[in-house]
Image (spheres, rainbow, N blue to C red):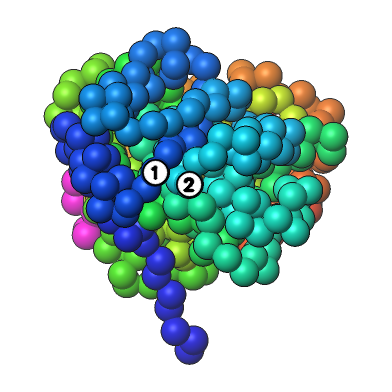
């Protein structure tokens, strides 16, 4: 039995108004100028302003790079590296969902490890020698947990594929998880990112690398998401706050133990169709749970119970496995997620190509049930038809 490694942020702040602590950290760490990585919508809707107003008030200099788009591309990271070098900054503030934070990780790693400046060589577990430029990560969605993970995902536009980078050197030094920064998330995004967080928790609870420390975090996250996501979609403040914490709690865990074939199958959908990552995960999750069920022991009993199913201790294995899957389907439906791949624009003739890409994805190896091309294709077909 090898040792279990657990890597977390040096510092994280949680709760309403936590964003004010950014000044504490900048001063404490003696940072001089920030390079803010974000996207144009967050600038337009004054979400970034919530941070820059604080920096202005304390006369802390910064420069804004807002060229990030959903499913960030190799070209975006390269542009960011160029802009960072010109800026004279010595740290990064990443403001956004997974896309800006992932872009910031790529930029920060390449600045301190220039031999990876082609970006694509960072795929998998790249042998970077130096820590990233220090990143303060401020999530604006409750889902990806990119602020506390050692992973990031970049899209190779030329090859129409997403690749996952897993690098302990990229974890943000500080995470500020303030639900106020998430309050402008529209319903659809709240639902999609919330289901992304649920996928993280369920996959990481059943992944081959799962163990007790991660299990504790993931079960708590499943319970919190089960009781809060519906309310968060209706913009209830307490539910939003709970979702902000829940997605971080599973982020601490899955970053360290890995995921499974839901993510392996979702990444190609993002690369092919630009499907939002949370939607891809949410549609696939119940179909993959049904596929994995024979290899999950009694874990789906815990999942069903955490999602609020009553009487799980009296259920047969078949009954509690079905109950867990049904509870996920119901939550997905209640927050307005489509039930099939067909509904989200996936084309049937692409399924085989998607299955090949899923088999090559770094997340697939952690799946509790062994995958092969034929089996993954079958799951895609079921998820396509419903």
Q: Is residue 150 magenta?
A: no
Q: Quadrant of residue 62?
A: top left
- Report how far apart the C-alphas of labels 2 and 1 lie in the structure: 6 Å
Residue under the point 19% across and 51% down: 311
Q: Quadrant of the C terminus?
A: top right
Identify the element where label 2 is drawn: loop
Mark 1 or mark 2, which is nearer the start of the sequence? Answer: 1
Q: Are marks 2 and 1 in contact (CB under 8 Å)?
A: yes
Q: Residues within 10 Å of mark 1 (few under 14, many from 20)?
A: some
Vertical position of residue 225 compared to residue 251: above or below: above
Question: Which residue in the structure is indicated by mark 1?
Answer: 32
Residue 90: which disc? 2
Residue under the point 85% across and 34% down: 158
Residue under the point 62% across and 51% down: 111
Q: Which residues are magenta?
A: 308-314
Vertical position of residue 215 compared to residue 44: above or below: below
Q: Residues within 10 Å of mark 2 (few under 14, many from 20)?
A: some
Q: Is residue 261 visible?
A: no
Q: Horizontal placement of 296 versus 158: left or right? A: left
Q: Is residue 313 magenta?
A: yes
Q: Horizontal placement of 172 versus 259: left or right? A: left
Q: Nearer the viewer, residue 320 or 173?
A: 173
Q: Horizontal placement of 78 versus 39: left or right? A: right
Residue under the point 31% across and 70% down: 213
Q: Nearer the viewer, residue 1 or 21?
A: 21
Residue 145: which disc? none
Identify the element where label 1 is drawn: loop
Residue 258, given in percent of the width and then of the height, sits at: 51, 61
């Amino acid at each position: 039995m090898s040792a279990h490694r657990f890597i977390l942020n040096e510092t994280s702040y949680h709760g309403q108004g936590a964003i004010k602590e950014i000044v504490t950290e900048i001063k404490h760490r003696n940072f001089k100028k920030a390079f803010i990585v974000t996207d144009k919508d967050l600038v337009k809707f004054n979400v970034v302003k919530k941070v820059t107003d604080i920096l202005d008030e304390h006369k802390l200099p910064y420069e804004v790079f807002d060229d990030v788009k959903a499913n960030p591309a190799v070209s975006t990271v390269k542009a960011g590296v160029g802009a960072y070098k010109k800026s004279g900054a010595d740290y990064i503030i990443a403001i956004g969902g997974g896309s800006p934070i992932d872009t910031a990780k790529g930029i920060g790693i390449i600045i301190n490890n220039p031999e990876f400046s082609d970006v694509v060589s960072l795929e998998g577990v790249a042998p970077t020698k130096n820590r990233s430029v220090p990143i303060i990560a401020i999530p604006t969605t409750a889902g990806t947990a990119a602020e506390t993970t050692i992973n990031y995902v970049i899209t190779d536009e030329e090859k129409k594929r997403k690749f996952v980078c897993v690098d302990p050197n990229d974890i943000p030094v500080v995470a500020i998880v303030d639900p106020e920064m998430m309050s402008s998330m529209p319903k659809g995004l709240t639902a999609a990112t919330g289901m992304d967080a649920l996928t993280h928790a369920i996959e990481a609870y059943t992944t081959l690398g799962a163990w007790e420390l991660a299990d504790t975090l993931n079960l708590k996250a499943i319970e919190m998401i089960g009781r809060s996501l519906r309310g968060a979609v209706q913009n209830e403040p307490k539910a939003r706050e709970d979702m902000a914490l829940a997605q971080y709690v599973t982020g601490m865990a899955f970053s360290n133990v890995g995921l499974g074939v839901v993510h392996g199958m979702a990444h190609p959908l993002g690369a092919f169709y630009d499907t939002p990552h949370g939607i891809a995960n949410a549609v696939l999750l119940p179909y993959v749970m049904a596929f994995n069920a024979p290899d999950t022991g009694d874990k789906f009993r815990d999942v069903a119970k955490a999602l609020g199913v009553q009487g799980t201790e009296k259920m047969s294995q078949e009954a509690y496995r079905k109950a867990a899957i049904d509870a996920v389907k119901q939550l997905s439906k209640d927050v307005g997620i489509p039930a099939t791949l067909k509904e989200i624009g996936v084309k049937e003739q692409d399924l085989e190509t998607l299955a090949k890409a899923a088999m090559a994805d770094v997340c697939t190896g952690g799946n509790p049930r062994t995958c092969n091309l034929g089996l993954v294709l079958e799951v895609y077909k079921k998820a396509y038809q419903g």
